Amino acid sequence: MRLLDEQYTRTPFYGSRRMVIALAEQGWNVNRKRVQRLMQKMGIEAIYPKPRLSDPAPGHRIYPYRLRGLAITRPNQVWSTDITYIRLRSGFVYLVAILDWFSRYVVDWEISITLDTSFCLATLGRALATATPEIFNSDQGAQFTSDEFTSRLESAGILISMDGRGRALDNIFTERLWRTVKYEEVYLKDYAGVPDAFGNLETYFRFYNGQRPHQALNYQTPEAVYFGVNTRKTVARTADSKRMPLRGDSS
C-alpha cells in the first residue's frame, strides 16, 4: 500500500494493470486482483473518464458538476473536499480536508482510522462554524453523497457540486494539495502511530496556511489571501480543538 500510494501520487492516471507493472519493476510480483482490492481499500482510482458517467450512486442523489468554466474570484466562493490515504509505520489512516479554491487555504481537516461519514461531518461542522461557502464541491464518495452530509450543506443554503465519476481533475486543487502534503510532509516522515501523524499534520497545515508562499498566489500565503479579503475571525486550530474522537486503537 505504501508503494501504491507513492506511485499513485506520481501517476494518478495509472489503473490496476499499470500499477501491477510498476510494482513488478520494483521487484514486487503482485497479482491484479490484490492491487484492485488494495486500491479500493485506499479509496483511489485512476483519473480517466469511465462509461455511464451520469449514473447516480444507488440510493443517493448525485449533483451536477458546477465549476466548469466558473471564474473563481473571491474567498468562500468555492470550497472542495476529498479524502486521501496517509501511511503510518504500521497501518494507515485517512485524511480529509476542506480547501478554499480562491486562496488554497485549508479551512479544516481531520484524520480517522475508518472511512465512515462521521469524521467528514465533524470536519464540515467546524469549517461551517467559521464561514459559509457559496458552492461546495466533492467527489461521489459515499461520505459526501450521504443524506447527513448533503442535508447539512443544503440547510446552510450552499449549492452542491460533484465531480464526474473517475474525474479527479474536476477537483484539481485538492489533488494538488495531496501531492504537496505527501511530498513535503508524509514521505519525509515515518509516523509511529495516529497521535504522531496528527501532531505532525497539525504542524504542517499551520505552516502550509500561514508560512508557505504559494506560486499560484503570487508567492503569498493561503492565509494572507484568504483573510486579506475575508476579515471574518477564524477559530484557533490547536491540538486540543474540539474534534471527533478517533475510533479504535490510537497507539
Image (cartoon, grey):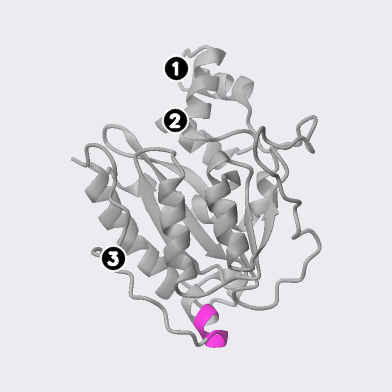
Which residue in the rendered view is the most extreme toward the left? 251
Which amino acid type is shown beneath numbered disc 2?
Answer: Leu
- Residue 206: x and y in percent read 36, 68
Q: Is residue 239 left or right of residue 60?
A: left
Residue 211 in view of the camera: no
Q: CA distance from mark 1 to mark 2?
A: 10 Å
Q: Amino acid at mark 1?
A: Trp
Q: Amino acid at mark 3?
A: Ser
Q: Main secondary structure of the magenta part?
A: helix
Number of the front mark, 3 or 2: 3
Question: Which residue sits at x=53%, y=70%?
Answer: 214
Residue wearing tag 1: 28
Upstream in sequence: badge 1 or badge 2: 2
Specify start and end residues of the magenta stretch as a single range.
Answer: 226-230
Give residue 68's quadrant in the image.
bottom right
Q: Earlier in the sequence, mark 3 or mark 1?
A: 1
Numbered tag placed on residue 241 in the rendering = 3
| Image quarter hosting the N terminus | top left
Residue neighbourhood size for the residue with mark 3, other residues' Cα within 10 Å, grouped as few (<14), some (14–19), many (≥20): few
Location of residue 165 in the rendering, given as x and y in whole percent from the top left corner: 70, 39
Confirm or deny contact between disc 1 and disc 2 (CB under 8 A).
Answer: yes
Judge the density around disc 2: few (<14), some (14-19), many (≥20) Cα neighbours within 10 Å: few
Q: Are marks 3 and 2 in contact (CB under 8 Å)?
A: no
19 lies above or below 196: above
